[in-house]
Amino acid sequence: MKEQEKIKSALDGFRLNAVLDLEELSDDDRQYIRERSTTIRVRRKQIIYSMHEKPKGMYLVRSGKIRIEQVNYDGSAQILFIYTTGEAFGYRPLLSRELHPVNAIAMEDSELDFISASDFLELLHRSVALSNMLLTSLSSEFTVLVNRINLFAQRGIKERLAFALLLLNEKYHHPNAILPESDIRLSRIDLANYIGTSPETLVRTLRTFQEKNLIRVKGRSITILNFESLLILSGIMR
């Protein structure tokens, strides 16, 4: 338990707070969302919106996982965030009146609640609680980006992979699970794009971690075996 508390504390500042807790909204606001939102189903690898596209509304993840990626000038991708159940995304360009600067792509078959731009802005105008939640989320997004840029600029591939696995373990962890480890399932290309390296370098580093009994790899699945050693290797422990 103490080990997991240490890891949780070390990841503070890297953990995105994007959960939209509908219970904190008024009955009228929850009713408004139920009436105005539509549920959409997306398949793995399906694009939800693309860079330079006009924002259409806000998305709330009901199930599945969505990656937010930026495409570089050389065509390579960098995964910035991964959204999962209960988290909202896609609304920031509506507030700043900009085009989407990133792509949103389903990492697995997912269900999303969608609220159109006009309905979202109307709800935001009337709901102080929603405004406060989204302000907190945007502030968290900025903090996470700054900390991540700083970490990635100063750490090598092994350190970045160790950090990413600890963070992804939380993303994939079932809330009712007793054991701390998760079944982290994502493609090697996605994981490479998440830590900013090539798939070939990632595979070699995963093999090294496996040989040291830090992780177990089976197909696309990765399971952490030694949390303490990964935390030390990541260099984020305070």
Image (spheres, rainbow, N blue to C red):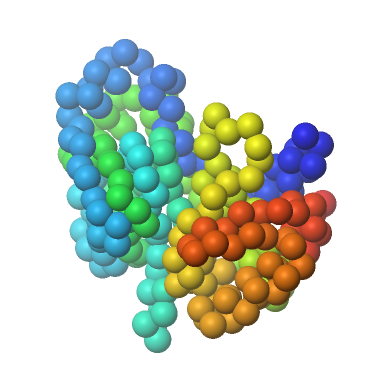
Extreme front residue here? 218
Residue at x 55%, y 29% (from the top left corner) = 176
Looking at the image, which residue is at 68% across and 49% down? 11
Can residue 171 be seen here?
no
Task: Work out whether 39 lies above or below 23.
Answer: below
Q: Where is residue 139 in the image (x, y as percent from the top left)?
A: 53, 45
| Quarter that holds the N terminus | top right
Q: Nearer the viewer, residue 55 or 67?
A: 67
Question: Residue 5, how many percent across, how many down?
Answer: 75, 38
Residue displayed at 34% across by 25% down: 127
Q: Position of residue 199 (x, y in %)?
A: 51, 78
Residue at (54, 82) in percent of width and height = 200
Q: Is residue 82 left or right of residue 7?
A: left
**Relative to residue 221, is residue 58 drawn left or right?**
left
| Residue 178 shows up from this direction | yes
Q: In which quarter of the image is residue 179?
A: top right
Q: Which residue lies furthest to the bottom in this view?
A: 74
Q: Quadrant of residue 30?
A: top left
Question: Is 157 left, or right, of 71 in this rendering?
Answer: right
Residue 197 image position (x, y, % from top left): 55, 78
Observer-nearest residue: 56 or 195?
195
The extreme top residue here reads 27
93 and 176: which one is in front?
176
Q: How many labels does the image show?
A: 0
**Above or below 34: residue 84:** below
Residue 164 vs 118, above or below: the answer is: below
Examine the image and state in which quarter residue 101 appears: bottom left
